Image (cartoon, rainbow, N blue to C red):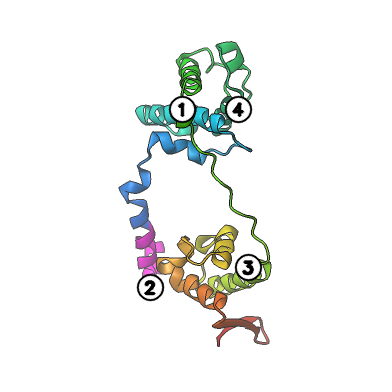
Amino acid sequence: MLRAELDENGRADWVAEDMDALLDPSRYQVEPREAYRRIKLRRPRPLDLAVLRELAAWREETAMERDAPRGWVVRDDALAEIALHRPQDRAQLARVRALKGHVAKGADGAALLAAVERALAMPEDQWPVVPRGRAPVSGHESLVALLQALLRLRCEKHGVAMPMIAKRSDLDRIATEEAPDVAALRGWRRHVFGADALELRAGRLALTGDGRGVAAITL
């Protein structure tokens, strides 16, 4: 039924485009020593990141060996807590709140402690650099509000859920960056919304009331 509806609406290519992205092997190739970048630490220091890098690399390799999700090995919040407190023995490791009780006593506990030890023995010049945060964005709320209205308008027209096209963070980037790398500006999403979003930002498209709701007009 879904295939028939897609064909009837001329949207089979939309699904094919998204499926091609999911079938791209590079999407799933992960460098273990880069895996730490996905885990958030609050106000990290270089040594915190060095420990987290070793922990995350071990978890990545272990998850691949076991063919299991990362969270089944150790959860992100447990790795973050270990990186910040750097336990030195099994008793200290067992006090990590986000770590399952039996883990500290077993082979995984020993591996986690070894990862901490490797990081602490590493020269400072090999510690990761703390990434610089993005400067606070301000003065763009009115433009984002217009982009949200345009997004809703286009999604209602095409019968597509708004989160499928763009998230709030995507709209922030469209509003503030010269060439944002967001999905909303590629492929079928660009056709539905992205191209008009750029026109709106450039002042070549406007939103107005049409007596029944909101309409877009080209200037």
At horizontal 68% and vertical 66% (from top left) the residue drawn is 139
At horizontal 46% and vertical 21% (from top left) the residue drawn is 118
Residue 122 vs residue 60, the one in the foreground: 122
Residue at mark 1 to residue at mark 4: CA–CA distance? 13 Å
At horizontal 60% and vertical 27% (from top left) the residue drawn is 84
Q: Residues within 10 Å of mark 1 (few under 14, many from 20)?
A: many
Q: Quadrant of the N terminus?
A: bottom left
Q: Give coordinates of residue 203: x percent, y percent.
A: 57, 80
* Residue that carries the numbered disc 4 in the rendered image: 84
Give the quarter of the image for residue 10.
bottom left
Q: Give coordinates of residue 164: x percent, y percent.
A: 51, 61
Tell me the kind of residue under disc 1. Answer: Glu
Asked if marks 2 and 4 touch (Cβ < 8 Å), the reply is no
Tell me the kind of residue under disc 2. Answer: Gly
Specify the segment rendered in magenta: 1-18
Of badges 3 and 4, nearer the viewer stands 4
Asked if marks 3 and 1 touch (Cβ < 8 Å), the reply is no
Q: Residues within 10 Å of mark 3 (few under 14, many from 20)?
A: many
Residue at mark 1 to residue at mark 2: CA–CA distance? 48 Å
Q: Residues within 10 Å of mark 4 (few under 14, many from 20)?
A: some
Whether residue 17 is situated above or below residue 9 in the rendered picture: above
* Residue that carries the numbered disc 3 in the rendered image: 144
**Of the numbered discs in the image, which one, if any, rests on residue 54?**
1
Q: Residues within 10 Å of mark 2 (few under 14, many from 20)?
A: few
Q: Earlier in the sequence, mark 1 or mark 4?
A: 1
Asked if marks 1 and 4 touch (Cβ < 8 Å), the reply is no
Q: Secondary structure at mark 3?
A: helix
* Residue that carries the numbered disc 2 in the rendered image: 10
Asked if marks 3 and 4 touch (Cβ < 8 Å), the reply is no
